[in-house]
Image (spheres, grey):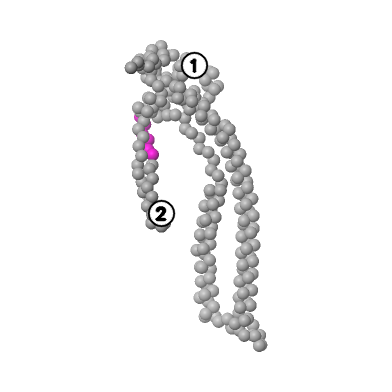
Amino acid sequence: MNTPILPTCPACKQTDQVQKVTSTYGMNTKEWYEARTSTDADGHTHTYHEKHEAHTSLGLRLKPPQQPAGPTHPGLWYGIGVVFFFFICSMLFPLLLIPFSLILPFVGATSFLPDISGVPTWVVSIIVFGGAGLCGVVVVVALLAWLGVKVKQRFDRDLANYKSKKAVYDNEDQPRWQRAMERWNQLYYCMRDETVFIPAENRAIKVDDMEKYVYDPLFRSLA
């Protein structure tokens, strides 16, 4: 089996200490997964694997470019907010009825309802409490409608902001990272000089400047 010919380091003009950066990074990095379990509200147990990494000092210096995180769609946070809102309402609504259920039996409806001749007290009670309840419902519905309009306006602004950030991510951030990864995969590392280089460009760069070298065209032109 033929041994692959390594490129010559532009700094020391030797090949004996030259290694591919991807290989050197792999030898100085350890990855493993740990199984973790969690239990949901229904008592079901779920198992997932969490990735861990450990690097030597050289492994940290030769890490590949970090993929940029894309923007989060606002629908996720608004969905969580809506679920939380209805949960709070379901908890508070029964509590709001407790004072009335405790006070009315002691006060008595006849003590504050008007005495209308010929009309049973229970009918007057239904009219009064039903009217008050209807007014309360109208007020609550109006408040919810107003809140819904405000939330919709805020959501539209957040959605427009998300689309703007997503366009920048898709057209600039992601392609820039992909180009940097392509260059990182072409890099070689010279252990003697602690430099990195791309053979076709024939220039050695200090390993601490590797990120600039793969990302910044201006730095490459001046290096």
- Residue at the extreme front of the image, as rendered: 1
Coordinates of residue 219 in the picture (x, y in percent): 53, 21
Answer yes or no: is residue 206 visible.
no
Q: Is residue 136 above or below residue 217?
A: below
Within 10 Å of disc 1 (Cα), the crowding (few <14, some 14-19, many 20+) is: few
Q: Nearer the viewer, residue 167 or 204?
A: 167
Residue to which mark 2 is pinned: 40
On the image, which quarter does residue 165 sit in?
A: top right
Assign a secondary structure to mark 2: loop
Magenta-colored segment: predominant secondary structure: strand
Coordinates of residue 9 in the picture (x, y in percent): 41, 15
Q: Is residue 216 above or below residue 122?
A: above
Coordinates of residue 134 in the picture (x, y in percent): 63, 70
Name the residue at 50% across, 37% down. Answer: 69
Q: Is residue 166 above or below residue 102?
A: above
Q: Is residue 174 above or below residue 120?
A: above
Say which mark, if any, is on residue 201: 1
Name the residue at 35% across, 32% down. Answer: 30
Within 10 Å of disc 2 (Cα), the crowding (few <14, some 14-19, many 20+) is: few
Answer yes or no: is residue 214 visible.
yes
Amino acid type for the residue under numbered disc 2: Asp
